Image: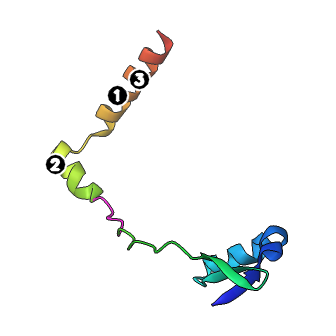
């Protein structure tokens, strides 16, 4: 356990903060007597990020439908008409 005086806490808090971030406990002393502990907060286990299955979602929405070039061109023209008018 690291120790620091009240003066060190006041003047060099950044170094104490670095110790705590590394997982160290810091005992704060005033006139040589311990008055407090500065301890890191225990971290909860991180939730694992689950990547969505975009291919399965696309299949569920479109059910294997494939657009032809003519369909895509017609959709683009419809979008442009909606923007312009």
* Image coordinates for residue 51, horizontal then vertical, percent: 33, 63
Instruction: Give the residue drawn at x 81%, y 68%.
Output: 10
- Element marked by disc 2: helix
Q: Quadrant for residue 82, please give it.
A: top left
Instruction: Give the residue drawn at x 27%, y 40%.
Output: 68
First in residue order: circle 2 vs circle 3: 2
* Image coordinates for residue 56, horizontal then vertical, percent: 21, 56
What color scheme is it? rainbow
Give the labeled residue for mark 3.
79
Which residue is more in the foreground, 73 or 38? 38
- Element marked by disc 3: helix
Give the labeled residue for mark 2.
60
Q: Quadrant for residue 36, please give it.
A: bottom right
Label 1 CA crowd tier, 10 Å (few <14, some 14–19, many 20+) = few
Query: Relative to residue 39, is residue 4 drawn left or right?
Result: right
Label 3 CA crowd tier, 10 Å (few <14, some 14–19, many 20+) = few
Inter-mark Cα distance, 1 to 3:
6 Å
Give the labeled residue for mark 1.
75
Q: Quadrant for residue 69, please give it.
A: top left
């Amino acid at each position: 356990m690291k120790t620091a005086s009240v003066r060190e806490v006041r003047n060099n808090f950044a170094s104490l903060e670095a110790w705590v971030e590394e997982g160290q406990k810091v005992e704060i002393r005033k006139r040589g007597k311990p008055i407090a502990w500065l301890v890191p907060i225990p971290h909860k286990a991180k939730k694992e990020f689950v990547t969505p299955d975009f291919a399965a979602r696309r299949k569920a929405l479109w059910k294997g439908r494939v657009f032809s070039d003519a369909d895509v061109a017609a959709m683009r023209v419809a979008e442009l008409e909606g923007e312009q008018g």
